[in-house]
Amino acid sequence: MSLMKPNKTPSARNSAFRFRASPVLATGPAVHGDPPPPAKSQPPIIVVNSPPGATADKSKTGQRFDQPRSARPRVRDADREVDQDEFPKFDTASEFSFDTTNFGASTFSSRGSGKHTSNHPVLAKDEAIKRLTQLIGDSVKYGPTLVVWLLDQSESGRQNIMDLGQQLSAPYAALAQEQSADSDRFLTAVVSFGEKVEFTIDPPTQDAARVIAAMTGLPEDKTGKELTFSAVQAAVEKYLPYRTEERREVIMIVVTDEAGDDAEMVDSVVEVPHHHSIPIYVLGVPAPFGRTAGMAPSVEAPVDYRPSGNWRPIQQGPESRMLERIQLGFWGGSTDLDLLDSGFGPFALERLSSVSGGGFLAMRSGGGSYSGGYGAQWPAPGVPRFDPETMRRYAPDNTTLEEYEKLLSENAACRALTEASQLTQLQLLAFPDQQFVKQSEAQLTTLLAKAQQVAAKLEPAIVTLHETLKQGAADREKLKSPRWQAGYDLAMGRASAARARIEGYNAMLAAIKRGKKFENEGSNTWVLESAESIDASSALKRLIDDAKMYLQRVVDDHPGTPWALIAERELVMPIGWKWTER
């Protein structure tokens, strides 16, 4: 297999393209050629249990597998929205692709005005592992192959690793038995990571039983740290000679239920695998939509857990490079739509897998019901999911940090959405008082003043959120991406609705304090009810109209998406207020 020298097209490998909706796996462009420029300096990686001189078996270093091989037919991937002109063209036989479809369905009915039914893949761990085994088997048949497993040692991911070892036992042994006793056609290395990176099996071995024993016997790392990308970087550096000198197929498989605490390394780490056609597959969990984690922050906290303690909360998202969903609760404290399945893996892992030519394989639980909130499992059974055929149009921007920042600098709406998404979470935990019994003028005035004080505590943060988003309104019509359109409109609609409700509430109470009279002589109680409009200032009425316009546009233009589901819920409760009396 001859090496192809790349065209020196400026920035060819850094151009923007979009993820596909998980769990469909696909390959990206596979590239052989000269080593890339040195990566930017990264924090030091702590590597243990790496024997001196173990980079490669010296008896085989430099051995070349040049026997004629026919190129594998490429499985064309309709799911991946890639402008093929963005990468240099190479002929390569190192292209693996497989599809994870038709494994189940789920239905989620919202409490709002719409129903979301999605007949889409629900991939269990055993099916995911089956597909990976199939991939490995195909590669071994095609040519000499090194498989490098990178295993998360964290407490939360422990069960995934145990399942992996148990379910790989038989098929891995079968693959090994197909090779002759003196053949090194199929080799495996195991790397584990937590706070440190450890080469658990190195040099690579032909012994399948040893590989499985290493997986099932992997010790837990209780630090709560996952140096995922440091592990990938160390593995690539160590095993690159198997690709460049021995001309082996090298496949790396990361198994983790988190996003990694060193995800900022992704752009530099992925350069070498992309350049040398080393596909990296990730067996992981989908990112929660617009959130950094789907589990309670304390899942991996120390025994003496304190919210303010010196520890890092679990990281499992978001699916985009930066947060693109505001942190605003629903009026009354409902949490059932706080966690949604984004349909994509954590951003950096998706980028690592897609740019390297591998893919992200999302594990999900089928069936069950979900009532909202953060727990000890993600994704929880029954958590709302969305059809990947629909979500393909809403893939996050798979760009370098520099390109993403350029996108934000060029469009105020994008910039405003990301800035608003960084603001402190706002939970509207309880309905403010809406019923006021009048015993005397003084007593009623006191009741109203106390209610206004509660609302006044929320108002500054809501106003800040809304004003931040308003800064991008002038550039809204310039947005061409459905994802950015839906994201900005939902955020602006929800922030407008929250501000209209809180300012409208205060305005309505102020009207009573100014001496509004009962119409019925026998009435002694004022009741504030939700309404489609409000008897207040024209500015407040415009704010309500704007909220409805933005939210309804999301529902109409982006059906079957998480943005539409949230907008539907927001529209269930009228945004205005009216007084009734008893």
Image (cartoon, grey):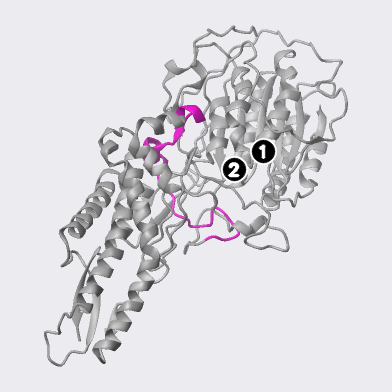
Q: Which residues are magenta?
A: 374-403
Q: Are marks 2 and 1 in contact (CB under 8 Å)?
A: yes
Residue to which mark 2 is pinned: 259
Residue to which mark 1 is pinned: 228
> Callout 2: 10 Å neighbours few (<14), some, many (20+)?
many
To which quarter of the image does residue 300 belong? Answer: bottom right
Quarter the N terminus occupies: top right
- Does 446 appear in magenta? no
Q: Residue at x 50, y 47 (%)?
A: 122
Q: Residue at x 80, y 41 (%)?
A: 214
- Does 400 appear in magenta? yes
Lateral position of residue 193 relative to residue 391, left or right: right
**Is residue 341 in view?**
yes
> Observer-nearest residue: 558 or 347?
347
To which quarter of the image does residue 501 belong? Answer: bottom left
**Magenta span dominant secondary structure:** loop
Q: Position of residue 4 (x, y in %)?
A: 59, 7
Q: Could you tell me which secondary element the residue under label 2 belongs to?
A: loop
Amino acid type of the residue tagged 2 in the rendering: Ala
Amino acid type of the residue tagged 1 in the rendering: Thr
Q: Which mark is residue 349?
A: none
Mark earlier in primary sequence (2, 1): 1
Q: Position of residue 102 (x, y in %)?
A: 47, 42
Q: Is residue 439 above or below residue 313?
A: below
Lateral position of residue 430 relative to residue 190, left or right: left
